[in-house]
Image (cartoon, helix red, strand yellow):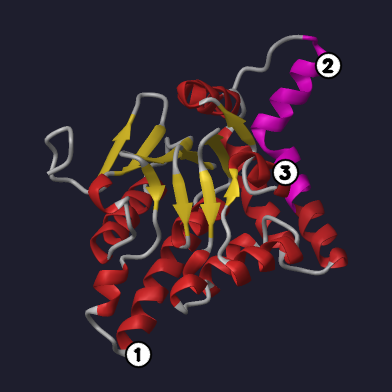
Amino acid sequence: MTPDGSTDILLHTRDQRGVHTVTLNAPRSFNVLSEAMMAAFQAALDAVAADPAARVVVAGASGRAFCAGHDLKEMKARPELAYYQALFATCSKLMMSVRKLEVPVIARVHGLATAAGCQLVAQCDLAVAAQEASFGVNGIDVGLFCATPSVALSRNMGSKQAMEMLLTGDFITADEAKARGLVNRVVAADALDAEVAVLVDRILSKPREAIAMGKALFYRQLETGMESAYQLAGQTMACNMVHGVAQEGVQAFIEKRAPHW
């Protein structure tokens, strides 16, 4: 049972503004991504995807850690190739679901984020970390190169910086994570919620339709060549421009007033 008396390993709430909060809630196990945790997390993301009024997701955790990666005890109990292939496919689907959501996902990181936990931070669109948070991909310490975490990590920071973390298993501080591009902001622990709220409010002040188009384009263009990226971006901007939110926004600018979205 969790400290608040709940037996749920993941808590999912939605406020009237369309802000979904997903909280990893297995503090005794440092919020590891067990099979049950990943299933609950996937269900929460599917619920967000099905909510046409969703605007943003905040992903956080309870207890002392953000997420300590996969459940090694659970993995060791089934030393079978097919099981491991299915397990990592499940995790990859979860990470891609974060990417495919139309709305931004903000990681709220207050403690340890290691291996697949660090991968989750890297996979989110934005991340705010408490000063005492730390980040690592230390599977190599138990003989397991963090291959799947490397996919997200290498898309956040320089390749040599990512490879050093992957090869050594060394942890970096929140300030180092910000300097390397893994997180956006670092604040004192008691200011973490307020800083996340600042980002949430800024996102809510912008039109959902433009953000959805922009997020999809941003990640598509990263995976293609520059010429193709410009073609994709131009098409997206054209579609965005004919949409009502942009038409209203431009008209409001011309008329020197606030837009009505």
What is the quadrant of residue 20 in the picture? top left
For image coordinates 83% across by 16% down, the residue present is 254
Label 3 vs 2, first from the N-terminus:
3
List x then y, in percent, for residue 166.
60, 68
- Nearest to N terminus: mark 1 or mark 3: 1
Q: Label 2 is placed on what type of residue?
A: Ile
Q: How crowded is mark 2: few (under 14 residues within 10 Å), some or many (20 or more)?
A: few
**First to last magenta residue range:** 236-256
Which residue carries the number 1 mark?
81
Determine contact: label 1, label 3, CB under 8 Å. Answer: no
| Residue annotated with mark 2 | 254
The image quadrant of residue 85 is bottom left
- State the mark number for residue 212: none
The residue that label 3 is drawn on is 179
Q: What residue type is labelled 3?
A: Ala
| Residue drawn at the location 75% of the way across and 16% of the way down | 252
Compute the Cα span from label 1 to label 3: 38 Å
